[in-house]
Image (cartoon, helix red, strand yellow):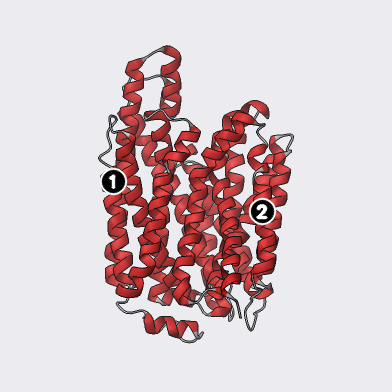
Amino acid sequence: MVTSTSRWGALGALVLSVLVIGLDATILNVALPTLATELHATTGDLQWILDAYMVPFAALMLPAGAFGDRYGRKRLLLIGLAAFGLASLVATFAGGTGALIAARALMGAGGAVIMPLSTSILPVIFPPAERGRAIAIWTAAMALGLPLGPLVGGYLLDHFWWGSIFLINIPVVVIALVAAIVFVPESRAASPSRLDVPGAVLSVTGLAALVYGFIQAPADGWGDPRVLAGLGAGAVLLVAFAGVEARTRRPMMDLGLFGNRVFLWGAVGATLVSLGMTGVLFVVPQHLQAVLGHDAFGTGVRVIPMVAGLMVGGLAGERLTARFGLRAVMTGGLVVLAAGFGLGATTGVSSGYPFVATWLAVLGAGVGLAMIPAMDGTLAVLPEDRTGAGSATLQTMRQVGGVLGVAALGSILSAAYVGALPSGAPAAARDSVAAAVAVAAGTGDSALLRAARESFTGAMDLVLLLCGAAALLAAVLMVIFLPRRTLALTKTAQSGHDLTAAR
């Protein structure tokens, strides 16, 4: 029996675990110019320092969840935290780009274990009445780490050496490890199945190839042979993975979960919300820095209204779902999200930060209202002995959706920005709005500065408009496909019986 004190102590450990992942996802961005100078890193090196984390992070979540069900979720969580801490230590004192890239890859592997295992532990230790609140706090911690990255990174780089941006991870990981050892109970599948080696190999290689293709596409172009090879190989391998899983008696990914309308459409909704949220976190910091003129520290502070809105929306969503049901609240959250995107799409060059803060807060509320019930609903229908694999499936979909969001929306942003620049703009200004601002500052060209800011703002508005359209589409899908009542389904799933009751 898990006591109330133990539950919330365990949540503290899980919150610290995902906070450090969110922090690490963005803290490196502000350090890239420093790394280029200190480590003599080329543009290709810098790209791999970023991508070496993302590829294993997305590719290893599915087997991590399945291994947690078999060998123990707490045990795997501790291994993931230890790997993340060790990788942070190696990165802190890396003497060259090769060592740093290797450390980042190990960090991504550790994060791939932490993410689904921390999610799968939530429904084990929290009863349905408290689970929504726990998920809201867990999600807010993950989201809070994203804007904290530039904020903390900017401060550390101003006062210490570049390795300090990784050193900051270690005390957080140590505290999370101790709290997990003390408070998190061990749990595993009641009747563990044999390891699904073919499924693990196909899923890891397929997701790695697919994510690599998405990451390279904005830099190399969607028609580049390496991008096409990555996307094509990923698609083929994942189709083969689905075929293997359909014929395996105890598969790593239970495809029967997708026959459950709550799990399927809850996961789809959460994935689309993740796509939109990562798109926002990709374009808004650039707008705050290049257009409004804030530094990295100030940018991190100014993204916090979105996190505050997420927290408020998540806590409200918990209460509203109990009263109105999953479909109504998810749909309402997606509509609020679409409204935030629509408001953001009216941003002009002269729009001040108070206006930006307003629509960021609305966006955050929409994310909380839609995401928290979606995750709660999908976790509720997982049998207890499959929470690791089911959570890994959900988190993998969200992660791939996020990578796709950055890749696709980044390509759209770049094309719209370059297309709106004057034909005589310098070549360097076409690389990014930050480069254009730097060129304008160096040459004193106020016309270029104005044109770059107007072009980027227009491109950002287009991206936000597309995200709003996707949110509205998701709201329509929820109305059509989510069942009106989910209480009976949840009870059935919690007893580990028929997962197709809501078909």
Q: Depth check: 365 or 395 in front?
A: 365
Seen at 68% across and 42% down, the residue is 167
Instruction: Give how far across and how far down residue 181 sits, in percent.
Output: 70, 66
Instruction: Give how far across and how far down residue 339 sits, in percent.
Output: 26, 52
Q: Depth check: 211 or 34 in front?
A: 34
Instruction: Give how far across and how far down residue 332 sits, in percent.
Output: 28, 63
* Residue 299 visible, this angle: yes
Q: Depth check: 171 or 80 in front?
A: 171
Q: Amino acid at mark 1?
A: Leu
Seen at 47% across and 82% down, the residue is 493
Please tell me whether mark 1 or mark 2 is closer to you in this view: 2
First in sequence: mark 1 vs mark 2: 2
* Residue 228 visible, this angle: no
**Quadrant location of the N terminus in the rendered image:** bottom right
- In the picture, measured across the screen, residue 338 lies left or right of residue 401, that is left
Q: Is residue 406 above or below residue 7?
A: above
Res. 465 mark? 1
The answer to which quarter of the image holds residue 204 is bottom right
Seen at 36% across and 69% down, the residue is 319
The answer to which quarter of the image holds residue 120 is bottom right
Q: Is residue 447 above or below residue 271?
A: above
Question: What residue sits right under mark 2 in the picture?
Answer: 173
**How crowded is the residue under tag 1: few (<14 C-alpha within 10 Å), some, or many (20+)?**
many
- In the picture, measured across the screen, residue 15 lies left or right of residue 183, that is left
